[in-house]
Image: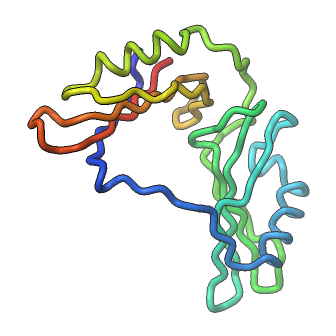
Amino acid sequence: AVVAGLQVPTEHAATAAPVGADAAADARADQLVQQHRADIRGSDADAYQVYRSIVDSNGKAHVRYTRTYRGLRVSGGDFVVHTDPAGGYAGVSVGLTTPLSLGTMAKVTAEDAAKTAVANYGGTVTSVGTPELFVDASRATARRAWETVVHGWAPDGQTPSRLHVITD
């Protein structure tokens, strides 16, 4: 089943690179992640990577992490560790309600995911990316899914676009 699809004109698509505002804030947040694993809904199968950090003018820090689960990217599993001006724990912002616990074997093949992606593209297809297996944790129950990116032209034949199709 197609779970979600978003068509974005190519000229508006953006990618963000990891940005560290303060190495000391990142290091302190790494310690807090280990001390407060229950708060971030962490499991032994998770790994975390600093994605971006911000230190406010008052010294409060906010360090955003991405998460992988058994080596798979987790969409909806990111979290932010907040510290007070002295570097003390001030809480987390996290979307997960429980730690992840699911298998990583897909029931749908990558080939079928690619076919589904092409079938859901409304314009002229110029290329289809390789489907990526990931964990979709954007809803109450996490599940394995494929993300396939289809490039082409929108139905008007003039607008370049790409469609991200999520298939489970």
Question: Residue at the spot x=33%, y=34% of the render?
Answer: 151
The residue furthest left is 156
From the viewer's perspective, tell me whether residue 150 is left or right of residue 46.
left
- Give x and y (percent) for residue 71: 75, 33
Q: Quadrant of residue 35?
A: bottom right
From the viewer's perspective, tell me whether residue 62 is left or right of residue 163.
right
Question: Residue at the spot x=42%, y=32% of the render?
Answer: 149
User: Considering the image in quadrants, where does the N terminus appear?
Assistant: top left
Asked whether 135 or 16 is in front, the reply is 16
- In this rendering, is residue 116 above or below 79? above
- Give x and y (percent) for residue 155: 13, 32
Colour convention: rainbow
- In this rendering, is residue 14 above or below 101? below
Asked whether 73 or 154 is in front, the reply is 154
- In this rendering, is residue 90 above or below 49? below
From the viewer's perspective, tell me whether residue 110 is left or right of residue 29.
left
- Give x and y (percent) for residue 81: 72, 64
The residue furthest front is 126
Question: Residue at the spot x=60%, y=25% of the render?
Answer: 133
Q: Quadrant of residue 144?
A: top right
- In this rendering, is residue 9 above or below 167? below
Asked whether 91 or 149 is in front, the reply is 149
Q: Please state the total of marks drawn on the protein image.
A: 0
Question: Residue at the spot x=65%, y=37% of the render?
Answer: 73
The residue furthest bottom is 57
- Give x and y (percent) for residue 105: 69, 14
